[in-house]
Image (cartoon, rainbow, N blue to C red):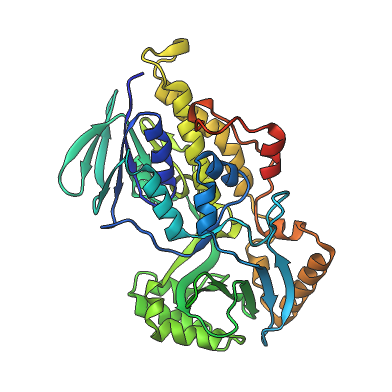
Amino acid sequence: MAPLKVLICGGGIAGPALAFWLSKLGHDVTVVERFPSLRASGQQLDLRGPGIPVMKRMGLEDLFRSQSIKEAGMQFVDDHGKQKAFYPVNTSGEGLQSFTTEYEIMRGDLCRMLYNVGKARVKYIFGVHVDSFEQGADSVSVKFSDGKEDQFHLLVGADGQGSRTRRMMLEPNAPDPFHFLNLYIAYFTIPREEGDEYMSTLYNAPGKRFVFTRRHAPDTIQAYLGYCTASDKLDNVKKSDIDEQKKAWAELFADAAWKTPRIIRDMLNDEAANDFYSQEVGQVRLNSWSRGRVVLVGDAAYCPSPATGMGTTSGLTGAYVLAGEIAKYCGCLEFSDGLKDPLFHALSEYERKFRPFMTEVQTLGPGMPNIVAPETQWGISVMHLILWLAALLGIDAVAQWFLREQNSWDLPYYEELAIPTQGRPESAIAKKTR
């Protein structure tokens, strides 16, 4: 089959990852990103489960490790900062990851990495988005926001949780695929102070609130505020300017203890917090990830939410499976095995093979995410006791209650995507990385 002309909407993680694989196969790939430059920003993320071998199959392990964050683990603290439970990072290379993994990295570093390894073969266009598209029998006609038009064999929506591509792909009266989990999170950066170490720290305040910090740099730390119940106050400001959003969050956490007063002060007053953003946390669930020659990947198709700890892994793995199925079925000039159009078959197989993984990932543990944010001080104390006992006994099932790394799904291996220096991983090794 002749090379495909592919347009990918979204220059975050899933989009450039897919572009890397498809361009490696010789396809003509263009990525459009509505921001004027690469969005190399954002907070800390990690890889788990199949995301780890996928990253290795891309040949990125050494580069990834050189830019990873050496976080010691995760601790839970009380009002006075006293450690109530501690879960160290798992650096053994075996078994499941803990709350902190050995594959922690800043989102911006991963975005730059994926962009750099593919940019020689991929055309990137910044400051532009798809304004509309129309599907034909053999192509998709696209109109861009700058007035230009073009045709592609395949249009990919990798434009995140609020995907414009998804809205245009679905029927006008289709139900909203975003399912709110009654959780809001605000993210921002603040200056580091003495005592802020390379450790993730979670503090719970009564009223279903939590404060979370992580250090990634010599002079700054990441701060997160979480509110785990429906809130008119936050709903009313979600379309307001950043200052109004910050004020609403500050009011919600005005009486919280630990380091919260300092965190709120810096959020309101320090320039480091100019990267502030907040979001409603939820999942994207669709009956189908494609329609004709339009397909979705990453958060646009199956956002699992930060509550699962599997967002980045899902995006990288989904891109790998989609590219693998395209490689498998779109690799010859004639339509083989009686397939009317192998591209449609590849899209169908992508969903058939990857949906079982996402179904498990999106199935939250009982009580999640509310269980991480008790209503009362008594509830917080009980949670701390359970976490302390589990940490003392080395019970990693507690971490898996919160996260969704453990999964019965097996990562496919595609010979067509193999990098020449790599051999086929043995099944025992593949299972170990899961």
Q: Is residue 269 above or below residue 84?
A: below
Q: Nearer the viewer, residue 226 or 18?
A: 18
Residue at (32% x, 20% y) in the render: 2
Q: Is residue 305 visible?
A: no
Q: Is residue 349 above or below residue 383?
A: above
- Reply above or below: 310 against 418: below
As drawn, the residue found furthest toward the left would be 147
How many numbered marks appear? 0
Q: Residue furthest right?
A: 393
Please identify the quarter of the rendering in which residue 194 is found: bottom right
Residue 242 spot, x, y in % from top left: 35, 75
Seen from the viewer's position, the closer of residues 161 and 8 is 8
| Viewer-side residue, 146 vs 67 | 67
Q: Residue 180's spot in the image, x, y percent?
A: 52, 59
Q: Quadrant of residue 137?
A: top left
Q: Point out residue 390 in the picture as x, y percentages from the top left corner.
A: 80, 65
